[in-house]
Amino acid sequence: MGRIAGRFKRVEPRRRVRRLVLGLLSDLPRKNCWTIAEWAGESTPEARQHLLSRAKWNADAVRDDVRGYVVEHLHDERAVLVVDETGDVKKGIGTVGVQRQYTGTAGRIENAQVAVYLVYARQRGHAAVDRELYVPRSWTTDPGRCRAAGLGEETAFATKPELAACMVARFLDVGHRAARVAGDEVCGGNSKLRSALEEHGTRYVLAVACSHEATTSAGKFRADTLAKKVLKRAWQKLSAGTGTGTGAKGHRFYDWAVIDLANPETGSRQLLIRRNRSTSELACYRCYSPARVPPAELVRVAGSRWRVEEFFQSGKGLAGLDEHQVRRYASWSRWVTLAMLAHTFLTVVRAEEHIRQPAPDGLTPLTCNEIQHLFITLVVQPVHTAAYRLCWSIWRMGPETTYRAVERDCEI
């Protein structure tokens, strides 16, 4: 909290943001302005709502502090920047960026808000260093709607790959470095993003659809067609990394093949193909490096993409990344930035503890979940009397007060 304290000119918002971050780190089953205010021992949620909506502070500046915090403590020459999106299902049409669109969270088209994140992934830990809200054309073509949600009337439409390119450029422009960039099919299928990364000399391994067309010395072919032309002896059994927190255990072994692509310019461009050893299902990746690299390195980067799923899982489960009940853009950016900070704190403690205090034989190494539990239990321990609990119960039951609180939530 000392790292970001200078972003707040007054002591009151500094204290409020500290309590909000502690609330995000708490074990509350649901985290919003109301529940965190009650947990923190306050009589109403007004201070939280004011901090997110009307207080004067720059969420982008705090985001820069979070990025520096991540790189300082998790720095690794082999770190990978992973770009991916996540969606939050929403009701109504007033929340900024909401429209009916596909979201992987629900696995279908839903009324949802989608954001793109940039995650710094390394073996000892991974945390988000940037975020951008995807604002659909249905919003950018309606200045009045943008104004009502706190967006500038001049807000221009940007595709998800364009948001990804912007975040990667921000990361590199301040002098940080990462070995490669990894991303999903939305990013890999965008030639402008690939060109922008190549112009920066940034290596990448980006997923593409099996129907993606790539040009080799023999001509232009679909990726799955090229896979059929690979000789049997050219396939290699390699691990894409160990299982993630979603339930997979041990190494994920696949068959891999690399095909050189036509290269009219400098650098090495390749198509990486992954084949499931049981089902023969294919996954394909466009790769770029200034110089040729071993297949094992490309496979390592491709496997790093699963790290972002771990971030979404722990960021939402432990730090309330998706539990923001806000409608305006400024409030959204402030909430998710502070949630990123809370999650990064857990990630950094976990990474450094694994170095200083390796788990004894027979014990599982400390996880972010256990660190959160210990931190709240041993360090914070909010204690409330029965009278305090009754005051909050009366506040919740008061119809006029409750109405005003709901109205304030709608405003932010």
Image (cartoon, helix red, strand yellow):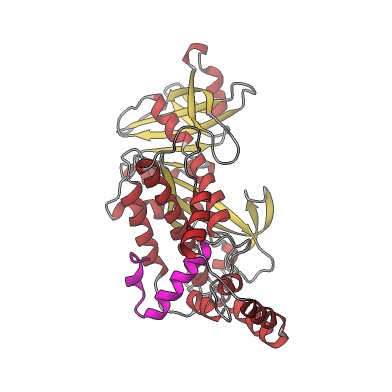
The picture places residue 226, in percent across and down from the top left corner, at: 52, 23
Place of residue 33 in the rendered image (x, y in percent of width and height, measured from the top left): 57, 72
User: In the orientation shown, which residue stands out farthest toward the left?
Assistant: 175
Quick one: 74 or 225, which is closer to the camera? 74
Q: Say whether residue 325 is visible.
A: yes
Q: Residue furthest bottom?
A: 400
Based on the displayed image, in which of its 4 quarters is residue 163 positioned?
Answer: bottom left
Per the rendered image, the range of residues in magenta is 1-25
Depth order, front residue of 134/8: 8
Q: Would residue 9 be found to the left or right of residue 373 on screen?
A: left
Q: Is residue 5 magenta?
A: yes
- Residue 333 visible in the displayed image: no
Q: Quadrant of residue 9?
A: bottom left
**Which corner quadrant holds the C terminus?**
bottom right
Residue lying at 58% horizontally and 81% vertically, measured from the top left? 44
Q: Position of residue 387 (x, y in %)?
A: 64, 80
Nearer to the camera, 259 or 214: 259
383 vs 294: above or below: below
Q: Is residue 408 magenta?
A: no
Name the chief secondary structure element in magenta: helix
Q: Quadrant of the N terminus?
A: bottom left
For residue 174, above or below residue 214: below
Q: Residue at x 49, y 71 (%)?
A: 330
Horizontal side of residue 269 vs 394, given as left or right: left
Residue 360 lies, in percent from the top left, at 44, 36
Give the number of callouts: 0
Residue 326 in which image quadrant: bottom right
Which residue sits at x=63%, y=72%?
94
Residue 307, placed above or below residue 55:
above
